[in-house]
Image (cartoon, coloured by chain):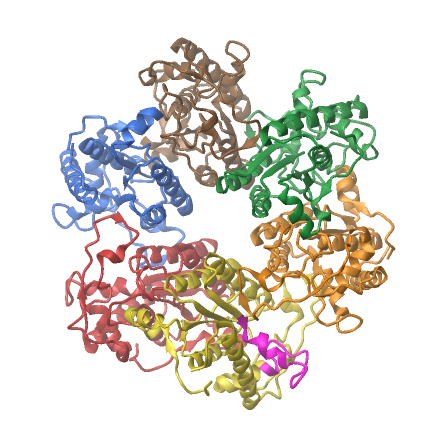
Chain colours: A blue, B red, C yellow, D orange, E green, F brown
Amino acid sequence: MSAKEGKPVLLEELTSAEFKEISRRKPLVIVPIGSVEEHGSHLPLCTDSFQAEEVARRVALAFGGIVCPPIRYGDCRSTRNFPGTISIGFDTLRMLITDILSELDRNGIDKILVITGHAGSAHMIALRLGAQAVVEKNPKLKVMFLSDYDLAYELRGKEFPKGDGHGGLIETSRILNIRPELVRSPRPKGKTWAPPFMIVADPEKYFPSGVLGDSTSATASKGRKIDDYVVGRLCDMISKNFGIKRA
Amino acid sequence: MSAKEGKPVLLEELTSAEFKEISRRKPLVIVPIGSVEEHGSHLPLCTDSFQAEEVARRVALAFGGIVCPPIRYGDCRSTRNFPGTISIGFDTLRMLITDILSELDRNGIDKILVITGHAGSAHMIALRLGAQAVVEKNPKLKVMFLSDYDLAYELRGKEFPKGDGHGGLIETSRILNIRPELVRSPRPKGKTWAPPFMIVADPEKYFPSGVLGDSTSATASKGRKIDDYVVGRLCDMISKNFGIKRA
Amino acid sequence: MSAKEGKPVLLEELTSAEFKEISRRKPLVIVPIGSVEEHGSHLPLCTDSFQAEEVARRVALAFGGIVCPPIRYGDCRSTRNFPGTISIGFDTLRMLITDILSELDRNGIDKILVITGHAGSAHMIALRLGAQAVVEKNPKLKVMFLSDYDLAYELRGKEFPKGDGHGGLIETSRILNIRPELVRSPRPKGKTWAPPFMIVADPEKYFPSGVLGDSTSATASKGRKIDDYVVGRLCDMISKNFGIKRA
Amino acid sequence: MSAKEGKPVLLEELTSAEFKEISRRKPLVIVPIGSVEEHGSHLPLCTDSFQAEEVARRVALAFGGIVCPPIRYGDCRSTRNFPGTISIGFDTLRMLITDILSELDRNGIDKILVITGHAGSAHMIALRLGAQAVVEKNPKLKVMFLSDYDLAYELRGKEFPKGDGHGGLIETSRILNIRPELVRSPRPKGKTWAPPFMIVADPEKYFPSGVLGDSTSATASKGRKIDDYVVGRLCDMISKNFGIKRA
Amino acid sequence: MSAKEGKPVLLEELTSAEFKEISRRKPLVIVPIGSVEEHGSHLPLCTDSFQAEEVARRVALAFGGIVCPPIRYGDCRSTRNFPGTISIGFDTLRMLITDILSELDRNGIDKILVITGHAGSAHMIALRLGAQAVVEKNPKLKVMFLSDYDLAYELRGKEFPKGDGHGGLIETSRILNIRPELVRSPRPKGKTWAPPFMIVADPEKYFPSGVLGDSTSATASKGRKIDDYVVGRLCDMISKNFGIKRA
Amino acid sequence: MSAKEGKPVLLEELTSAEFKEISRRKPLVIVPIGSVEEHGSHLPLCTDSFQAEEVARRVALAFGGIVCPPIRYGDCRSTRNFPGTISIGFDTLRMLITDILSELDRNGIDKILVITGHAGSAHMIALRLGAQAVVEKNPKLKVMFLSDYDLAYELRGKEFPKGDGHGGLIETSRILNIRPELVRSPRPKGKTWAPPFMIVADPEKYFPSGVLGDSTSATASKGRKIDDYVVGRLCDMISKNFGIKRA
């Protein structure tokens, strides 16, 4: 597992014949997913994408995998009315991932990791339903699907506060590690007071900062630790789930 | 808030004119959702329905609300290949709840509680998307949506084990409270060893007992306490969310 | 064929293992469908459901069949703007029945009766299209589909008036037999004067009573006779269509 | 109301400007629908179309209306597996009529007659749902929708046998009147013995003749009488429904 | 290849048995498509249909093929807001052709020509996608799909002006050949000045004449030559593509 | 208009507040679209994306516009069975562009350029239909949509051969200009001999080289000239269409 340096094999740069050749080795293929979404006053709109793509890069290097062109549009719900959020529909996202995985399957790929930096519950289900439909058509296809936040948030209640979330300490630290030049000052803290379990058309009304947690103490070295943790955990599971070893 | 006794106003029994009359008072209308789903060797297929309908009954009595005919079919994923599971599609469920809430809205109802006993994540999102679409058309409509398990599982890590789940101690206790004659012996314990984050076509292969947790120590009185807790928490939130008082 | 007493096997109460066991005997499985729909000033909104569920109960007892949880929401057209009508969409209903029958088929069930108390023509076609799609996927699956009113109305022009219909003499008599406590007084008579073959957005304008026929002379004993007739006719056809004998 | 002679205004022959001019007079616009469907050994595949188009022609002449290009493809169910049947899907037909009526509405047309020669129940509902959707968007649009067989079959049990149907005495007589050169000899009789209310994938198995009734005594003069009856009844209803007089 | 005289075998006139018999010879089946669309001040709304149907007629005579009932409704974009245009939706058209080709395939037909007189790019793609879906299900089915304007416009820059188009010299000449009585005087010239590559909601604003080119010098004999060219080119390609000879 | 150097404003890097601020100035927003598609033995799979993104970059610099995250998946037809092609469905692409443009519209953006490097006709129509739907909802929104190949191919028959196409001289030259390190040797020539107008399931069978034209004489300086031509033409049209001046 490598550092920030190193460029994995990118599907976009291969020729058709090269891809055919490589695909015979049955490599792990990684599909990174993000979003274009408000992330507080300090973080860029594609914060989710940058993180998923960084994890994809490191995992690809670790296993000699191939990284697909990222999908940088996701289904955003609680932030959907903020300026700059470009949310695509649930069905659009479901169809998009279905199509891409079907095509990878048609190409003989049998090991796929779908990793999403955005982890909204509808977004996650759209991706899961799409992946499930493809796996049900070809049960021999192995698809692993998660958000890097499924792992990063394992650190909450340990080194990081329990309530940390969207645009908070963990996310800010990770972007400080990955794209430090894109983190603005000052850094905000915030919370939501949306009425519990209510379906609302205007979630931003209860969430003016657009941030969950306190980003002020974020540092690049914290981010580096989180990323190492996420990538480490993920690589361990990949090894077991797909029965492959790190390069 | 009442005991197991007592029958609330049921939409199914009202005439059109009676409904019109009652709806002028802007009552809380409750839509209970369940599933037809494997629930271990000891619990009936409609376990989820029985719980949601019991909570609906008690909440309706508490607030003078109206209970709609239950939807007893849900979107079941991890148990979908077990005998007796009758799972409906994600889109079917989404459309069904959309239609029902739209019609309640057309009838001038402005306070709706959708309560589901089944809490699978795709099932939840199907219901949430449907509710959200209706609220976005009429933002004045107040819709609260949750599973009783969003509340019941707050007791995990306290009086009940952390890993308790589907068909486990909490669920078995609740059915012992609500429909004791339907709980068979002996009571199972079980777990799942599905590979983490893998999309599989045969989840039952990793989950032969169909049960998460240990149901052997379940009792009706534990079930009663859980139900009281769920109903109490829920009624408090309803009071605040809708600005109404218990009858 | 039995009287009003007796409870058939209910899918909702079976465990997964019990269902598996019973399904080996290839029982008749019955899916009752109703509606939530205006039924005059004297009858409850779920009038259609109560009748279909009563017929389902008696047929299940007659053949040792299993009754599925009812679908109590239907596609209502001419009454759709009345207070209390909760009409679901044509496609929703079509998908719902498709899903349920597909799942019964997946479970190895090979004899299904779909019986609907609501008999609007769009509602009937939605159910028929759904059933047809499932049968075309598995032509060995035997599905019988009808409304109890396909049979009850055979008595029109005989013991009952020709023009009797929605909420009229036959329907009121049947509810007096099945759920007498739910029939209000006084009993209405009514008709529709909708312009023939016109597609209108406001059918209720031409149908203020919401009743077709004269319900004043309805009695429980007439209802009992009608129900006996419907159940008798239906059981005869079931025996022939499925090649099974009454229990 | 006229004889077989006479050609009405055909939409297909008008220029854009002429149509604009005529549409200012708010004419009745007629959309004839048929099918391509087995009709016994003696009748052509477009039997349904020929009848609807003939009725459309006569009605248009009677009221100075405009006839749209016919839709000659319908949704055929019981004959769908016979050679030569070209059945389009339920949703296709529903969308097709929705689009056409929407466009007529956009063009300022406010009186539309949709007349179908094929009268299968799913086919009828597809057309009805489409028409209803357009009327609900613009309730001022007046749409009348029926099959000429809704009227022709009023003669059953009177001058014609009760059980007469598809490709039978009435239909054969009408084609002898409208397109005599297309009726082959000998003329068949037939019936169906499909099991009542069963959903089957192979309806033709129970219906080898593809004919309901006895076509042997059909004559052109009977056909003429039927057509006159249908057109007469229809024109009376049109006058009342749309408030217009025959030309 | 024949002149304007001669009537080919029409699907609409065959009986089921005759069709079965003929289809054993594996004939070419032709599906003509048109539109109901503004065509200048001089041409009728079904101009596109008349041309495609004439080509279909001549091709059918040339190869002993069968002509299906035409689809006279197409997807019109740039003329969609003109009086008299009746445009059907992209998906409607796609489904319609999919259904018809699927049914021809089910009937054992293996050679199909889909010929459209309307050649708007969305319309063409709708038809192409439908045809492609059917061919992908049965790759042995041979489907040829084009507009007669794919061929007629090969004459632009030769005998006819480069910029000639919708309702212009070529189209007017062809209608003068096919349906001379339907061409009005005087004949217009026109052009469009829509902003290049802009997606506009009101294309007619930039295209008031609804005509591209100069129709004043159109003659029937020019039309005859164009039609002969189109039919000749088409028959040559049909011979090669399907491996059949002219009758 | 600038050289290869220079980085425009990227949506992905802006914060929500920055985007809000910039969007007040009503900037041109550019959505680049590509494909993952076989491009001969010498060019990478994302050849189409690289070109569209380069054009987007230069146009954004020229007008002070904002570049959105690219969509790198397109609808590929003739190359869809080649190794490495990852084609998404027509409807997926249509919905994706609809969602993105709708969200830009919601954000107050009123000038959008959608530029696609892939120019297959179905792909183009999917994008066009999506854009059209959004413009019809808000006719004040100005959307310009084209492929850079709509412009680059204006040079065919002039400096470049008429038949040049997919992976040929023009495309190879452009990639030599934009991403020279990704062009492999030797460079192929090729053509297709697909039967004209036939709908085939296996287009690659007639197109083994996957290349149209002769790429051997391609050079970076030719590519530079082509790109300058495309960007120049495009900027001129943008100025007129949107009424804006180059920065």
Q: Is residue E123 left or right of residue A221?
A: right
Between D224 and F99, the one lying in front of the other is D224
Query: Residue B243's x, y, as percent?
Result: 36, 66
Residue at the left extreme of this rendering: A159
Q: Quadrant of the N terminus of chain F?
A: top left
Question: Which residue: 46% across, 88% down?
Answer: C3
Q: Is residue D112 visible?
A: no
Query: Residue F215's x, y, as percent?
Result: 42, 14
Question: Which residue: 51% across, 18% down?
Answer: F153
Location of residue D138 (image quadrant): bottom right
Is B212 above or below relative to A73? below
C152 magenta-colored: yes
Q: Quadrant of the C terminus of chain F?
A: top left
Q: Is residue E2 visible?
A: yes
Magenta span of residues: C146-170
Query: Residue D115's x, y, as percent?
Result: 72, 56
| Total numbered labels placed on residues in the image | 0
Is E107 above or below relative to E45? below
Query: Residue D27's x, y, as percent?
Result: 78, 50
Q: Is residue F4 left or right of residue B153?
A: right
D195 magenta-colored: no
